[in-house]
Image (tube, rainbow, N blue to C red):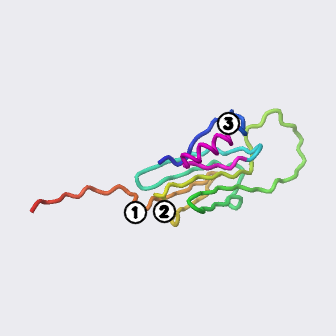
């Protein structure tokens, strides 16, 4: 089962929200809260036979700014940082990065053991390790001898 669905940010936000609402009602494989004028960080998702791994690029944040929560098999990653009011000498003519608050949600497959999720934050990258439940792991074939 796929852990994440990608979307094209060029779509109108209202159309995307309506489409996602109806698509998720039938597929129920992904959930994301849409916030007006909110930037989403770059994210990598990996799957192996034993686990999932999510990497979230969070430049300008520290681990105290990050809140993680799992409820009803929905993993919520929320970053909330107080904006510092400081006098700026320059006016931006083009800006591609900065520390933006956001909230992102992933509907986790039932195979994820939510009690054993681990997270670490190092050099601006949040890494989540989501192990699969023992019963979801592939089993080794067993040879049966005929009596």
User: Which quarter of the figure has residue 140?
Assistant: bottom left
Please report contact status of discs 2 and 3: CB closer than 8 Å, yes or no: no
- Label 1 neighbourhood size at 10 Å, few (<14), some (14-19), many (20+)? few
Query: Which range is magenta?
Result: 15-34
Q: Does 18 appear in magenta? A: yes
Toward the viewer: 23 or 105? 23
**Distance (Cα) linking label 2 and label 3:** 31 Å
Residue at x 72%, y 44% (from the top left corner): 39
Residue 6, percent across and down?
59, 40
Q: Which numbered tag is attached to residue 38?
A: none
Residue of label 3? 9
**Distance (Cα) linking label 3 and label 1:** 37 Å
Q: Does 14 appear in magenta? A: no
Pointer 2 or 3: first along the chain: 3
Q: Secondary structure at mark 2?
A: loop
Residue of label 1? 134
Please report contact status of discs 1 and 2: CB closer than 8 Å, yes or no: yes
Q: Secondary structure at mark 1?
A: helix
Residue 73, percent across and down?
56, 59
Magenta region's main secondary structure?
Answer: helix
Residue 17, percent across and down?
68, 42
- If the image is split into quadrants, where does the C terminus sit? bottom left
Toward the viewer: 15 or 147? 15
Pointer 1 or 2: first along the chain: 2
Left or right side of 31 for 142: left
Q: Which numbered tag is attached to residue 113?
A: 2
Q: Secondary structure at mark 3?
A: loop
Left or right side of 3 for 125: right
Residue at x 71%, y 50% (from the top left corner): 102
Residue at x 59%, y 43% (from the top left corner): 23
- Label 2 neighbourhood size at 10 Å, few (<14), some (14-19), many (20+)? some
Pointer 3 or 1: first along the chain: 3
């Amino acid at each position: 089962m796929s852990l994440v669905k990608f979307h094209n940010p060029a779509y109108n936000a209202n159309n995307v929200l309506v489409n996602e609402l109806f698509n998720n009602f039938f597929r129920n494989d992904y959930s994301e809260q849409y916030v007006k004028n909110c930037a989403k960080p770059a994210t990598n998702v990996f799957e192996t036979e034993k686990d999932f791994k999510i990497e979230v690029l969070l430049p300008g944040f520290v681990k105290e700014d990050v809140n993680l929560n799992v409820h009803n098999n929905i993993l919520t990653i929320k970053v909330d940082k107080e904006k510092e009011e400081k006098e700026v000498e320059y006016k931006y003519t083009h800006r591609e990065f900065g520390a933006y608050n956001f909230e992102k949600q992933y509907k986790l497959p039932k195979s994820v053991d939510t009690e054993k999720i681990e997270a670490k934050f190092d050099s601006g990258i949040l890494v989540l390790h989501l192990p699969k439940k023992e019963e979801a792991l592939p089993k080794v074939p067993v040879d049966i001898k005929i009596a």
